[in-house]
Image (cartoon, coloured by chain):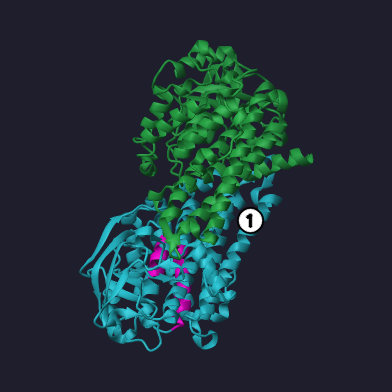
Amino acid sequence: MILSDVFPVPVEWLDTVDTTMADTVAGWAEREVSSKRLEHGEDRDGLLAPATRSLFADIGLQSMMVPERLGGGGMDTPESVMTACAALEAVGTADTGIGFVAANTLALISSFTLEPGRDDTLLERLASFFTGGEPAVGALVLPSYSDSKGAGLERFNGLSYQVAAERDGEGFSLSGTNVRPQCCGASAALFAIAFDSGKGPAFGIVSRQAEGLKPGREFLKTGLAASDNAELSLDSIGLPAEDVVCAGPEKFLAVLNRYYLFCAAVTSGALLATYGILKEWGDTRVIKGKGQVFKENPLVASIMGEVGANIARTRMLTYELARMLSKPDVYGPPGAPAMHATSTAVFKGATGAAMRAMDATMELMGSAGYATEWNLERYWRDVKNLEAVVVPETAALVDMARHYFGLKTV
Amino acid sequence: MKDTDGFTRPLEYLSPLDDYLRGIMRTWAEDYVMPHRREFDEDWKDHRLIEPAFARLQGELGLQRLLFPEDLGGMALGRSGYIGTFCMRGFEEIARADSAIAVAFGVLFWPLIMICNEPHVNRRLCEEFAPMFCETDRPVFAANAMTEPQGGADIENMEIVKGSTIQTTAVLEGDEWVINGHKLWPTNSGGVADLFGVVCTTKAGSTDLDDFAFIFVPANLPGVTQGGPYQKAGMAADKNGDIWFEDVRVPSWYRACGPGDDMKYFKEVITMGNLGSISFVCGAMMNVFEILREFASEKTFRGKPLKENDDVAGVLADFARDVEIIRIVGYQYARMIDRPDLYGDRWSEEMVAKGRAYKYFACDRAVEDLGRVIDLMGAYGCDRTNDVEKHWRDLKIVQLWMGGKQLCQMEVARFFYDCETL
């Protein structure tokens, strides 16, 4: 495990599968991304797309949760959440954007592979997306703010579903404009679209080939260059009953909670990369006026200590959450309200800690921290983008308060 | 509140040209910046879209002539009793559109402060360089070459380090300075500047204040080499790179003020840099306010406009509070700059330290507040079409430059608490 001598992980919860996966992905990170970064920057064609293909298809991250009998990695039990966490942390050290895309993909796959009592009809149909040897990205479409023209759309915890769903026999018809996926609207193979099923929230699994689905133009954003995101328009897309997964609040929240965990793991990876950058800076720079190695200055040291503490806490909490979500027999259903509050707290804690740590690191590095060549600014932009996209701050805070303090009307 | 002019300023201290200046800058911004600024990030190297904005502002409108005496074709801001409030107003308007353009424009005056501002006008150097800026309608840039690869904060930490870490040397040979050294990161480097104000030492390792020298170097002299710009997280209109000086020869009278006075008046450069930084923060935050107000009115949450939710209103209030306070503080500092008879010389330890305090307060608030605004905006916060993330990226470097937050803290502590070894 990367830097486990500096930032401990709870090793008794990690088995050989987890550590082997983490080490494999760490090797990929160095080989396919870090060693090529100076030459390629954030070039999608030259660096990010080939690296994503290598990770998703060649190493098989995208098929790890598909049952072995369908050609996948066979990790289709809750324990795989810990494996995914370790892997995603390693991905995040190399590129937060690839990690974010992977988090989306694994969260989507988990919606139809990890649920107890799952219906394998959909799984058997979709397995080939992920085991076919080509990279297959999945993207979640989550509730968000609506614009005033969208008033009337059903809401989940205050946020509006981005699509309207009408009953169509046993299934549904989905419609919506300016629908914004979490990632890769321009290229994702599958979307897990949140909608109101009439009996609470659910996800509909929709292929990008679905009739009536049109991606718009890719829009530019702060970071996450590996994600070519675009808004979608959905015109009465047919959603058969067997393509509806995780219906009901508990199952729906289970997917969200795993997604929050995966994003926290990616963030933890970005923080470990930040540590490496700051360590090198602190070891090699000198405050000449005081004849001090940079890190030996008390003010600098105090800031570096805070950075280190943020990394240590984030890592620890992320693995704690992974343990809880991978052991429903001990901690209860992964979609329980308490688990949702904890998942939200860990995710928000991770990204908040990461931004504080990266802000402080950039302050210590001055202009070098701000320049692309020194790599820090990419993690800073990427994590900020991730933090904002996953869930708006105000919604997240009230989600937690709802559980912790028993809110009734908000 | 109707618009950003509702944020408070001390109306009785404003320059008589305040409204006029706002009108010029606002029209320039709407015509030359706003239609293109979303493409500025990709234009960081070539400045194909950015260059026309500079051409209009500096050349056609002639604002690069601001500091020079009138008889040399300038606008005499260097002897104006409103230099502070004029700059605050002008730069906040430019930064509302793009803070990188604001800093690139502002820094062209930075070295010229040493020779154009009363009471230390260097008439001979004004006559020497005024034609470069005043007899052309193409944009001309100057740069303040201060930071070196081994560090910038040490060089700016003048009270304690006294210039002893400066490695760029100026040696007098006959009636010429011979300059050798390597500078890094100045605004308007990367091939942009026509004229450098170079921070040198006349004796390496010296703590004698007389050895701190500020010497002008035209960029086209033999021995001056500029590297290409570095790609950065933001601030695309500001180019930053390496500058090498290899046996560069300039006349001995290209030194700005002389032994002792160079160090003394260089602190006025720092003071004006503090003011500029606050004005950039203020302008950018006012633009974010405009965007946020529209966003929070248009988007709904819990079935009503975002802004009508109590928890959201709390975040909006914190943002508006900080814009209000930063603007008042910025104009107060501008007033202090305009009235040295009341507040002390612009180069005094007190003015510098107080400016550092206001600057790092403004920057810290801006960085935190813009982060919270992006979080509030959720999936739309990092969308480049909303422009908020651009200001978030751009303002981070304002917090980092001029020695960064830690140097600000040391100078503030030193002044307010009489520290002796920081």
Predominant secondary structure, magenta span: helix
Chain identifier for the green-coloured part of the image: B
Which residue is at the far top? B71
Q: Nearer the viewer, residue A148 or A366?
A: A148
Mark 1 belongs to chain: A
- Chain A representation colour: cyan
Measuring 41% from the left and 25% from the top, which residue is drawn there? B139
Mark 1: few/some/many CA within 10 Å (<14, 14-19, 20+): many
Whether residue B191 sits left or right of residue B364 in the image: it is left
Residue A369 on image: x %, y %: 53, 48
Q: Quadrant of residue B210?
A: top right
Q: Which residues fall within the magenta stretch? A: A78-104
Q: Nearer the viewer, residue B360 or B250?
A: B360
Residue B419 on image: x %, y %: 78, 41
Q: Quadrant of residue A385?
A: bottom left
**Where is B157 relative to A338, above or below?**
above
**Where is B103 relative to A354, above or below?**
above
Please tell me whether mark 1 sits on a helix, a strand or a loop: helix
Q: Nearer the viewer, residue B83 or A71?
A: B83
- Residue bearing mark 1: A304
Residue B349 on image: x %, y %: 72, 32
Which residue is at the far left? A211
Whether residue B203 sits left or right of residue B232 in the image: it is right
Residue B405 on image: x %, y %: 63, 45
